[in-house]
Amino acid sequence: MIVWSLGPRCLTVVGIALLPVLATGCYTLVPVALGDPPLTTNVRANLSQAARQRLWAVVPADRRYLEGKLVARDGDSLLVDVTIQGVAETTTFLQRIPLSRDDLVSLETRHLDPFRTAVAGALFAGVATALVVSIFTGEAGGGAFPPVDPGLTESVVAGFVPWVR
C-alpha cells in the first residue's frame, strides 16, 4: 500500500482551485416596489409584452426579463445599464435602457439565501471530502491477478453487419 501525504504546496493549490466554488452563493429573487431598490443595485425587470416589442433589439424573443444595474430613477421611470452581447460572442456592450412603470410586470432584486447556500456548501464539502478520502486512503493498485481456471477458454467473435439503405 502506498501512503500519500499532502504537502503545504498541494493544499495551497487545492485551496486556490476550490476558492471560486466556495465563494459563490445561492441567490433568490425578491419582488420590490419601483421606488425601493437603491441606485447601483442589480435588478431584474419582468417586461410587459409592449416593452418586449419595443426592446426587440435588446431582449431576445424568448426572454421576458431584462437584467442590469439600476443607475437612475425619476418618478415612474427607471434607467437600467444592461450588458448586451455583440455579433461576435467576445464583444459586449453596455447600454442604458429607460423603463417606465407601464413597461414592467414586476421588479426583482437578488438576495443571498443563507439556507440554500449552506446546503449547497455542505453537499459540496461532503462530496469533496469523500473524493479526497477515497483517493488517499484506498489501495494504490497493483497486486496479483485473481486465479484463472485453465479449463475455460474465452474467445471473441467478430460479427459482420451489412449497411442497409
Image (tube, grey):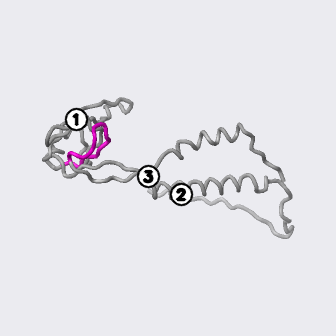
Is residue 45 magenta-colored? yes
42 lies left or right of 130: left
Q: What number of labels is visible?
A: 3
Q: Residues within 10 Å of mark 2 (few under 14, many from 20)?
A: few
Residue displayed at 28% across by 41% down: 38
Q: As rendered, which of 139 and 97 lies closer to the eye?
A: 97
Give the x, y percent position of residue 4.
78, 47
Locate residue 117, reporting x and y percent: 47, 54
Rendered image quadrant of residue 67? top left
Q: Which residue is mark 1?
A: 72
Q: Nearer the viewer, mark 1 or mark 2?
A: 1
Q: Which mark is residue 26?
A: 3
Q: Are marks 2 and 3 in contact (CB under 8 Å)?
A: no
Q: Secondary structure at mark 3?
A: loop
Element carrying mark 2: loop
Could you tell whether 6 is left or right of 115 in the image? right
Residue 125 covered by magenta stretch: no
- Type of residue at label 1? Ala
Marker disc for residue 162: 2
Ranked by sequence position, the earlier of labels 1 and 2 is: 1
Tell which tag, 2 or 3, sits nearer the viewer.
3
Q: Quadrant of the C terminus?
A: bottom left
Three-letter residue code for mark 2: Pro
Q: Is residue 11 left or right of residue 89?
A: right
For this view, does 157 lie left or right of residue 73?
Answer: right
Q: Are marks 1 and 2 in contact (CB under 8 Å)?
A: no
Q: Which residues are magenta?
A: 34-47
Q: Quadrant of residue 57?
A: top left
**22 up-or-down from 139: above or below:** above
Residue 134 placement (x, y as % from top left): 70, 56
